[in-house]
Amino acid sequence: MRTIAACFFSGLAIVVVGCAAREESTIPEKVITALETCVARHDPEGCAALYTEDAEITKPRATTVRGRAAILQYFKEQIVPDLQMFTDTQVNLVQGTLGVVEGTYRIRNMNTRTIVEDGEYLNILRNRNGEWKVFRSFFVPRHAPGADVSVSPSAEPTEK
């Protein structure tokens, strides 16, 4: 009888561990697209709520935005009613309570039908109490405003 009970509990432990390991291997799609939804709704408060209290947003040649209050202010300054954000996720990984989502993004002005900004992004997320929130965001625009632009006259000699 003890042998049967030991085998049963051993088998049960293997099943529980196997199920726990398969709980979540990627960040849910609704979490990944939540920022797009908030931008489309012109909802800076909703955007900021997607981030942890100690979150940071980093862009090249810009000051890092630290903390949810600063992130709220950042979104209030950046989001206008005509903008929409589109992302294409290429990496989506979870290890324990941390997740990484990486891909490309485009921000489009829907009135002028132009791409205002595009580039690559990397988000690091934390899962606390079953809720995923962005802990770190890195946005790298393909063409950063003011980058590689010169207003100096050409150094080439001119014919006289």
Image: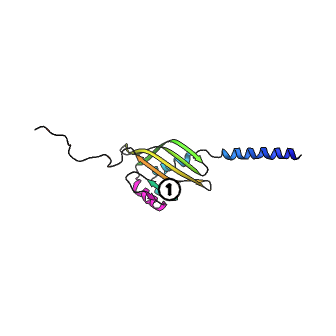
Assess disc 1: are there few (<14), some (14-19) or many (≥20) residues with their C-alpha within 10 Å of its C-alpha.
Answer: some
Q: Residue at x 68, y 47 (%)?
A: 20
Which x, y percent locates residue 132?
Answer: 57, 52
Point out the image quarter for the C terminus. top left
The residue depicted at 12 percent of the width and 37 percent of the height is 159
Q: Which residue in the rendered view is the most extreme toward the bottom?
A: 69
State left or right for residue 116 relative to residue 15. Answer: left
Residue 114 placed where, x, y %? 36, 43
Residue 2, x across and y down, in percent: 87, 47
- Residue reaching furthest right? 1
Of 48 and 122, nearer the camera is 122
Q: Quadrant of residue 22?
A: top right
| Residue identifier under label 1 | 46
**Residue lying at 40% horizontally and 57% vertically, measured from the top left:** 63
Drawn side of residue 96 relative to residue 4, left or right: left
Q: What's under tag 1, amino acid-wise?
A: Gly
Q: How is the image coloured?
A: rainbow
Vertical order, 71 against 156 (above or below): below
What segment is highlighted magenta in the picture? Answer: 61-81
Q: Is any part of residue 106 visible from this angle?
A: no
Let me know if residue 90 appears in the view. yes
Tell which of 153 and 131 is nearer to you. 153
**Quick check: is 4 in the magenta stretch?**
no
Above or below for 96 versus 69: above
